[in-house]
């Protein structure tokens, strides 16, 4: 893959605006580059996603208090590990408008592990939690920022729409077709197969976040414990101290009931699957 300027790549890979929902997908038109002058080297030490970019690729989520877990609108498919429903208060944070794309992953890591290909705007998948830790470490070195995975509570709060939440079952709607690629609409007729789709093609949720339901599961930073909600702190919970597996959220292209905003999935931290990707949080 041709090395393009890192700032432009990061804008495209994570999103184009945090002030409105006017643009609902990345712009894949190539940018004109000067022909007569050699390209100047990128000075990544001056990279600042909060000051230097024309369009910010992260969405600001104002903190607040919400009811976490299997609330009534989640329906009859709620599971035991979504209870008890409990009150959680979170501080402000920034989260990626889109799932991390294959293009960004390849730029940072030098290779693309994904099982599905065909567009640089497909979400990266087939990445383990440990792979994500390596990716984030390298991304932080490149940018001088503090990217990380969202906590499980941050993820659910953002998926529900934060302080703008309208109480939907899925992230942004009660109609799964409107906001998600799942087993009911992710079929490719020409290939006679299911798979991931380009990020940003469905409607966003109340915070202008895309694909938080469906497309690919998203890793969180939390260890999984089916009983954690019974003992979870009420302010900025970060999950159990230790565990055997990590929490996935959001469902994927090969499911439907798992796309609910309160659904939790346990997954081994070194496991790989073409249904699993990630979304980033950044600490300002």
Image (spheres, grey):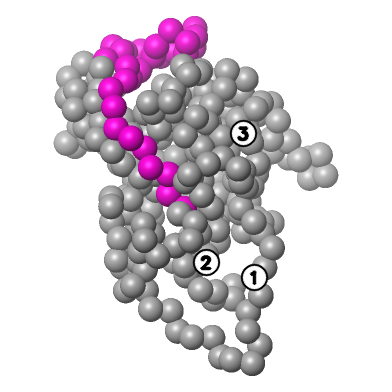
In the shown orientation, is residue 1 left or right of residue 57?
right
Relative vertical location of residue 109 with respect to residue 116 in this rendering, above or below: below
Q: Quadrant of residue 222?
A: top left
SS label for mark 2: helix
Picture quadrant where residue 61 is located: top left
Q: Are marks 2 and 3 in contact (CB under 8 Å)?
A: no
Q: Are marks 2 and 1 in contact (CB under 8 Å)?
A: yes
Image coordinates of residue 76 in percent, x first then y, are 49, 7
Numbered range of the magenta stretch: 57-86
Mark 3 and mark 1 lie on one chain; the one further toward the N terminus is 1
Does residue 257 appear in the picture of this structure?
yes
Inter-mark Cα distance, 2 to 1: 9 Å
Image location (x, y in percent) of residue 22: 60, 43
Image height check: is 82 above or below 155? above
Which residue is tagged 1?
A: 31
**Which quadrant of the structure image shows residue 227?**
top left
Between discs 2 and 3, the one toward the N terminus: 2
Which residue is at 48% across, 86% downward? 40
Q: Position of residue 97 (x, y in %)?
A: 48, 45
199, 116: nearer the viewer: 199
For this view, does 212 lie left or right of residue 267? right
Residues 139 and 40: in front is 40
Residues at marks 3 and 1 touching, judged by CB atoms closer than 8 Å: no
Residue on which the image places disc 3: 203
- In the rendered image, residue 74 lying in the magenta stretch gets the answer yes
- Report, in whole angstroms, how far the alpha carbon at label 2 lies from the one at label 3: 24 Å
Identify the residue under disc 2: 8
Q: Give x and y (percent) for residue 255.
A: 58, 27
Position of the N terminus, as image quadrant, is bottom right
Which disc number belongs to residue 114? none
């Amino acid at each position: 893959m041709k090395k393009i300027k890192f700032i432009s790549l990061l804008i495209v890979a994570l999103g184009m605006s945090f002030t409105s929902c006017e643009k609902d997908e990345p712009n894949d038109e190539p940018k004109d580059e000067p022909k007569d002058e050699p390209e100047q080297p990128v000075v990544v030490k001056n990279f600042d996603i909060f000051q230097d970019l024309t369009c910010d690729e992260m969405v600001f989520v104002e903190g607040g208090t919400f009811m976490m877990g299997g609330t009534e609108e989640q329906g009859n498919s709620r599971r035991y590990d979504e209870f008890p429903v409990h009150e959680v208060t979170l501080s402000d944070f920034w989260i990626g408008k889109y799932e991390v794309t294959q293009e960004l992953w390849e730029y940072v890591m030098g290779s693309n592990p994904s099982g599905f290909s065909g567009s640089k705007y497909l979400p990266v998948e087939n990445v383990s939690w440990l792979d994500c830790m390596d990716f984030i470490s390298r991304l932080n070195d490149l940018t001088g920022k503090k990217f990380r995975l969202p906590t499980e509570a941050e993820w659910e709060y953002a998926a529900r729409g934060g302080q703008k939440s309208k109480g939907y079952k899925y992230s942004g709607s009660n109609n799964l077709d409107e906001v998600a690629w799942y087993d009911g609409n992710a079929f490719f007729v020409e290939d006679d197969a299911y798979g991931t789709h380009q990020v940003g093609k469905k409607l966003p949720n109340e915070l202008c976040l895309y694909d938080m339901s469906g497309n690919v599961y998203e890793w969180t930073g939390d260890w999984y414990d089916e009983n954690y909600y019974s003992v979870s702190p009420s302010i900025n919970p970060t999950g159990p101290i230790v565990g055997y597996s990590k929490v996935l959220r959001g469902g994927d292209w090969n499911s439907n009931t798992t796309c609910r905003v309160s659904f939790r999935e346990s997954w081994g931290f070194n496991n790989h699957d073409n249904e699993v990707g990630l979304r980033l949080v950044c600490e300002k």
